Amino acid sequence: MQRGLNNMKKRGFGYGCIFYGTGYGNGFPDISRSIAELDTKGHINIYVGATEVGQGAKTILGQIAAEALDVPVEIVTLIHEDTSITPDAGTAAASRQTYNTGNAVKISAEELKKEIIVVAKGLLNEDHLEISNGVIRSNTSDKTLTLKDIAEASGGGFLRKDGIFQANTTEMDPETGQGNPYWPYTINAYAVEVEVDTTTGIVDIIRAACSQDVGRAINPSLVEGQIDGGFAMGLGYAIFEDINLDKGRIKHNRFTNYLIPTALDMPEIEKIIVEDPESTGPFGAKGIGEPVMIAAAPAILNAIYDAVGVRLTEIPVTPEKLLKALKKREG
């Protein structure tokens, strides 16, 4: 488009789209485990070896457990990051915790719910029971029990149930390229408008939009936060972060010369959450941790090309590289 604001600054639009397989993939065993427990106070404890690295696992997994048990999320405690008491849930990598470990948590919570109902049937002498907002109710009478009642009836012991989930993945055939390496896949698209100063080579991001397929948004605020963080990473990848390798030595080895984006470099991002529930995911959800970063850099580079007509194939697009490309085009 190359819309000129003046002789020095040009604006352009760029788009980037991806589909991304989450989980370890390609036949590598991808297993998560969880334990759901009713403690003596009538509270729910979820033991899971999922690591919180800022992706919101602690919040999401607690929500999944509360939904599966139909209890208030306030009485659910996630016990994690302690290998002496928690089962292995795999790494906080490959955008897999919401899908994989979320499924394991859901399974353990559902098994615990069944056990709670069994105990309640014996106490109430009723067959048609359900849990609603943490209270066990009869469908045929006005009889009710609390979770603490169930815990006390268990003799002060804990009711515990395990949940195990293994992702569906097969190794690709090296001869035919066929297989089922990932499940599920997530999809997104970025749109970016940039302003390029052709005298300094500086690229400013004016605005951006992200349309992200999430399966189902268990926590929309966390999805939007992931998009903000992912775009910031993609922005750094595209135009800032240059380690400057010289014969194997990192020359930009401190933040005075290894530049990263700050809040001042971030535009407002229009966030479009697309919900197409994943049938195998916990309540339809799937992971988006890495996907929200991947398409940002291609969109930015496409916008630079649209603005100044120079196609750059090496990142980051530093001012020096961009000026060099512009001079080369001018002969």
Image (spheres, rainbow, N blue to C red):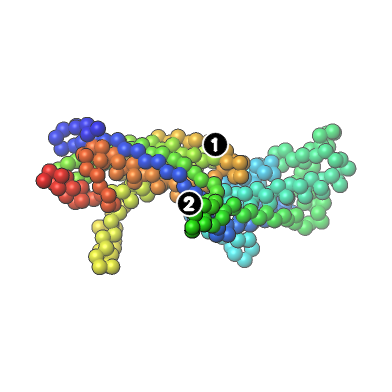
Going by the numbered disc 2, the residue's amino acid type is Gly
Q: Residue furthest left?
A: 331
SS at mark 1 in the image = loop
**Percent position (x, y) of residue 329?**
15, 44
The quarter of the image holding the N terminus is top left
For image coordinates 72% across by 55% down, the residue present is 161
The residue tagged 2 is 54
**Percent position (x, y) of residue 289?**
47, 48
- Relative to 140, 285 lies left or right: left
Going by the numbered disc 1, the residue's amino acid type is Asp
- Crowdedness near tag 2: few (<14), some (14–19) or many (≥20) residues, C-alpha within 10 Å: few
**Percent position (x, y) of residue 91?**
53, 59
- Relative to 137, 90 lies left or right: left
SS at mark 2 in the image = loop
Residue 192 seen anywhere in this rendered image of the structure:
yes
Residue 24 seen anywhere in this rendered image of the structure:
no
- Relative to 210, 106 lies left or right: right
Q: Which mark is residue 25?
A: none
Please state which of residues 125 and 3 is positioned toward the viewer in this rendering: 3
For image coordinates 19% across by 32% down, the residue present is 4
Spatial CA span between label 1 and label 2 = 25 Å
The residue tagged 1 is 276
Q: Earlier in the sequence, mark 1 or mark 2?
A: 2
For image coordinates 56% across by 55% down, the residue present is 170
Q: Residue furthest front?
A: 175
For image coordinates 47% across by 41% down, the residue present is 187
Count of number-bearing discs: 2
**Percent position (x, y) of residue 299?**
34, 41
Which image quadrant for residue 166?
A: bottom right
Q: Disc 1, disc 2: CB below 8 Å?
A: no
Please state which of residues 170 and 36 is positioned toward the viewer in this rendering: 170
- Relative to 290, 244 lies left or right: left
